[in-house]
Image (tube, coloured by chain):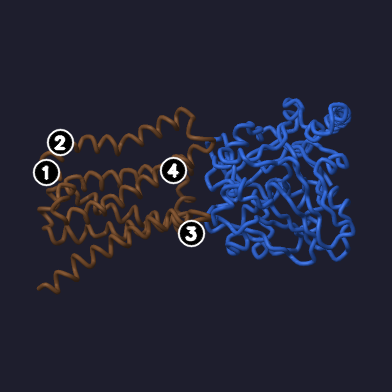
Amino acid sequence: MLSTQSFKKIKPLIFLAIITPLFFWTFQFVNGSLGVNPIEKLMDNLGEMALRLIVLTLFISSLSDFKQFRFLVEARRMVGLFAFFYVTCHFLTYIILDHFLDITFIIKDILKRPFITFGFISFLLLIPLVLTSPKIMLKKLGFKIWKRIHYLIYPAAIFSSLHFYMLVRANKIEPAIYIFIILLLLLYRLIYKFILPRRVR
Amino acid sequence: MKILPSEITSYKNYLNRRKFIKSSVATGLALGASTNLYANHSSDQNIYANQLDENDRLNSFEEITTYNNFYEFGMGKTDPSENSGNFKPKPWSISLEGLINNPQVLDLEKLLQQVTVEDRVYRLRCVEAWSMVIPWQGFPLSELIKIADPLSSAKFIQFVTVFRPEEMPGQNKRLLPWPYVEGLRMDEAMHPLTILSTGLYGHELLNQSGAPLRLVVPWKYGFKSIKSISSIRFVDKQPEATWSMLAPSEYGFYSNVNNLVDHPRWSQGTERRIGEFKRRKTLMYNGYEEEVGYLYEGMDLRKYY
């Protein structure tokens, strides 16, 4: 497996790979090649990308428990920040392009429609993670508290996958797969981080 | 009853079309029966321009035929236009069943000789809060009902989409319970705005638009306008309809466009007209209140959504 050093060298490539879709979709949006309902399409693409990145950070966390994959943890913060970045783009598309900053309507919409409520909760849950992402914050808070805050990624992941699940009208297999993966990773975390170590002690 | 010029062919155009249809039927007969079926759809696009309100621009043929909800061909908006190539809309027959004096299996070609195909420019409002303006060709459903000659006990009509999983890939998956079914109350079905469409923009319907015969009920959400109809049943009780079976709290049997009764998933107060950037206000009964409001007088529209 890769060493942390050599993995750091390919980090810029991962950065490019994650940001490229945004440029691509923006280009398509302006260019008119995002179909006949481009706002809906852009919002869907951004949202699904965000969900994928959230799940990716969970995978990184779980895999980096194993020595062979420890290097992956180097990319976790970047992937996590990108996840929030895509969530924000998704949310801004909804606020600006979809509803033209009609704030009263948007607040009602968020409160009234469970699927939007869930998406919004997920967005809020991610904010403390972003605020505590700089290394200085880790030092200030201490690892234990910092770690606790960052477990918020699990409820955020669950709310965002439910947001997707409730949005789909029929054949909910795809969003169900996301929920399943997230629960599996959560279960792994609970067993290997909390239950097993205690037994050993 | 007043029908706005934006919603129906002007009289002058109508007369022209009658003439046109007669001559094309004659040509069709001369060329042989097979070309006859869709001959009356090859008309000039410009004729639709004067049938519109100032703020209702016609959607383009491309918009109308590449953005579709037709789960028989997949759930994505472009799936129907991409996956419907193997569907064979010809030859076609419609089975008339149930509480009628003339149950029969009607050949579509023969049916089209007994009815008058007209232009109807209608707004189409999807429950997902997008809309289009579409120049349909079709004939009033009431003409087919007259052929069926219903008994007085027939209070509702159920429509069934053809079931052909080998031609409709979505039917191989359990996206919805197949076949797709929809229904109307008899007075809704008899209403002059309700048509069975065979074409749009002067072309015969493409497969993704519900070829060769589909319902169009402009004051109801789009999913009521069932596509590729293979049978029509006359019944005495409110029949089952696919979406309202699947999620009764979200989709009612009536599903009239109603900006006041909200859907749990989408606000119905506004809509995005395909091709426009800003949302526009949704009109009661999709703007056909004057024509159809009387059908629901005295009904609690929160209960009968």
Left or right of A1? Residue B279 is: right
Distance in Å between CA atoms under marks 2 and 4: 32 Å
Q: Disc 1 or 2, which lies upstream in sequence?
A: 1
Residue depicted at x 23% and y 51%: A60
Amino acid type at circle 3 is Lys
Give the structural element (helix, strand or loop) at label 3. Answer: helix
Residue A3 in percent (x, y) is at 11, 43
Instruction: Kindly identify which chain the residue marked by label 4 belongs to.
Output: A
- Which dot, 1 or 2, sits closer to the camera? 1
Amino acid type at circle 4 is Met
Residue B238 in percent (x, y) is at 73, 65
Give the structural element (helix, strand or loop) at label 2. Answer: helix
- Which dot, 3 or 1, sits closer to the camera? 1
Of B144 and B53, nearer the camera is B144
Of A38 and B258, nearer the camera is A38
Residue B239 in percent (x, y) is at 72, 63
Quadrant of residue A66 in the image?
bottom left
Distance in Å between CA atoms under marks 4 and 1: 37 Å
Residue receiving disc 4: A43
Which chain is the one coloured blue? B
Residue receiving disc 3: A112
Give the structural element (helix, strand or loop) at label 4. Answer: helix
Q: Is residue A91 visible?
A: no
Residue B92 is marked as none
- Label 2 neighbourhood size at 10 Å, few (<14), some (14-19), many (20+)? few
Which chain is the one coloured brown? A
Instruction: Kindly identify which chain the residue marked by label 1 belongs to.
Output: A
Distance in Å between CA atoms under marks 1 and 2: 10 Å
Residue depicted at x 45% and y 29%: A30
Distance in Å between CA atoms under marks 2 and 3: 47 Å
